[in-house]
Amino acid sequence: MWEQIVNLAISNGLFAVLFLGLLVYQLKDSRTREQKYQMTIEKLGNSLEIVKQVKEDVEDIKDKINQKKIVFRKVKEKTNEEKA
């Protein structure tokens, strides 16, 4: 197939050969670029999962701190009531 296209381009002149060369170069370059994009997207997806996990961990820590604050307030209120 490529041989027929090359022969047709050669028979049509220099600009057809140049166009064909540019087309082949562009197709190869696009394929390489697409592979790089796919790898970048995969890496970003993995990073996003890590960020989500860290967010959940931070929320858990905040919940535990808030629970401790509530317990501390109750203990403090009881001691204040006992003093009064």
Image (cartoon, rainbow, N blue to C red):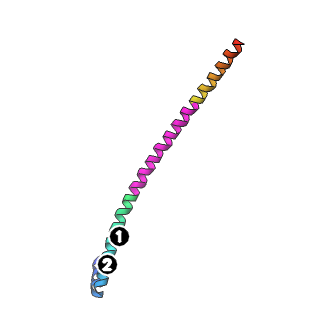
Horizontally, residue 7 falls left or right of residue 68, namely left
The majority secondary structure of the magenta stretch comes to helix
Residue 62 seen by the camera: yes
Query: Which element carries disc 1, helix, strand or loop?
Result: helix
- Which residue is located at x 33 percent, y 68 percent? 28
Occupied quadrant, residue 70:
top right
Residue 84 locus on image (x, y percent): 72, 13
- Magenta span covers which residues? 38-63
Q: CA distance from mark 1 to mark 2?
A: 11 Å
Horizontally, residue 1 falls left or right of residue 80, namely left
What residue is shown with label 1?
A: 27
Q: Amino acid at mark 1?
A: Leu
Query: Which element carries disc 2, helix, strand or loop?
Result: helix
Residue 29 locus on image (x, y percent): 34, 67
State whether residue 81 is above or below residue 47.
above
Looking at this view, is 79 or 3 the one in front?
A: 79
State whether residue 29 is above or below residue 16.
above
- Which residue is located at x 44 percent, y 47 percent? 47
Residue 44 locus on image (x, y percent): 44, 51
- Which residue is located at x 58 percent, y 32 percent? 63
Horizontally, residue 84 falls left or right of residue 15, namely right
What residue is shown with label 2?
A: 20
State whether residue 70 is above or below residue 6.
above
- Which residue is located at x 48 percent, y 43 percent? 51
Label 2 environment density (alpha carbons within 10 Å; few <14, some 14–19, many ≥20): some
Label 1 environment density (alpha carbons within 10 Å; few <14, some 14–19, many ≥20): few
Name, please, the residue furthest toward the front: 84
Of the two numbered discs 1 and 2 on the same chain, state the one appearing first in sequence.
Answer: 2
Q: Which mark is residue 80?
A: none
Q: Amino acid at mark 2?
A: Leu
Is 49 in the magenta? yes
The quadrant of the image that shows the N terminus is: bottom left
